[in-house]
Amino acid sequence: MVRNNAPDVVMPTCTPPTLLKGQKALITGANSGIGRGIALAMGQAGADVVVNYVADEGAAHEVAAEVKATGSNAIAIKADVSKEDQVEAMFKTMFDEFGTIDILVNNAGLQRDAAFDEMTLADWQFVLDVNLTGQFLCAREAVREFKRRGVVSEVSCAAGKIICISSVHEVIPWAGHANYAASKGGIMLLMKSLAQETAPYRIRVNSIGPGAIRTPINRGAWATSEAMERLLTLIPYNRIGETADIGRAAAWLASDQADYVNGTTLFIDGGMTLYPGFATGG
Ligand code: BGC
């Protein structure tokens, strides 16, 4: 039998509308990229969504409108996740509007790339502050509310779910990106330590480790055909990821379908973490 080993990609776009029915989700950095993809997928799955943003208010309101078009409720809230007072104010606004939180997606993150000996302390600090401290501050507020409220069995078998958006670079070293890779490695043990500590309260904490997903953060890696060709040598599955790939998985991971999944990283990377260089070498 002749098999076509490069079939057309058929991308499923929808998530079952009842997966997260009645749940309240906060997604940080949801005005673009992976955060937007997760906000749309969670809205489609029936969750009401807070679209957090720090810049580009217009885009955040557009995402909220797109979520509303799925039939779920949505509001946009501005907050810098690296600032304690802004994070506390954001959660307060969410509780005033939606009553509580069931799902936190710690997605906000950025890169400030530089050769190691040229990296400034400001480059280092900025990335650690947003990518790692931001996840700590938001997770702390969520855990406080999950513990206060406990399980509401009509809503979910868990008291709360946290999804940390990490990266393949929590395990793949990345020259020229030491600050970013250090932040993602830090997220891995933040996530696991928190999962261990809060599991007895029926709080589930997991990470998603995306590979190369077509978003503005890595435009340079896919925007030209030469760059795309180079990128695909790192991806055994031979296509770039789309934000919907991450959105669908996040909706599932936050749902009761994944109730026994705790303290793990789900890599969604087309096999980038499989050491593709070894497919023919070694
Ligand atoms: C980075 C992207 C990169 C991808 C794969 C992500 O975490 O933000 O810039 O393309 O990892 O290397």
Image (spheres, grey):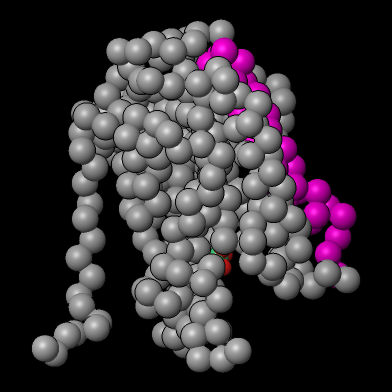
Q: Can residue 209 be seen in this view?
A: yes
Give the extent of the magenta segment.
118-147
**Residue depicted at 30% across the width and 28% down the height:** 20
Q: Can residue 219 be seen in this view?
A: no
Q: Give percent across and percent down for residue 277.
A: 55, 84
Q: In this view, does 63 lie above or below 74?
A: below
Q: In this view, does 201 lie to the left or right of 21?
A: right
**Residue depicted at 43% across the width and 34% down the height:** 260
Q: Give percent across and percent down for residue 36.
A: 41, 45
Q: Is residue 144 left or right of residue 162?
A: right
> Which quadrant holds the C terminus?
bottom right
> Which quadrant holds the N terminus?
bottom left
Residue situated in front as seen by the camera: 18 or 83: 18
Residue 126: in magenta span: yes
Q: Give percent across and percent down for residue 60.
A: 44, 38
Q: Is residue 201 above or below residue 187?
A: above
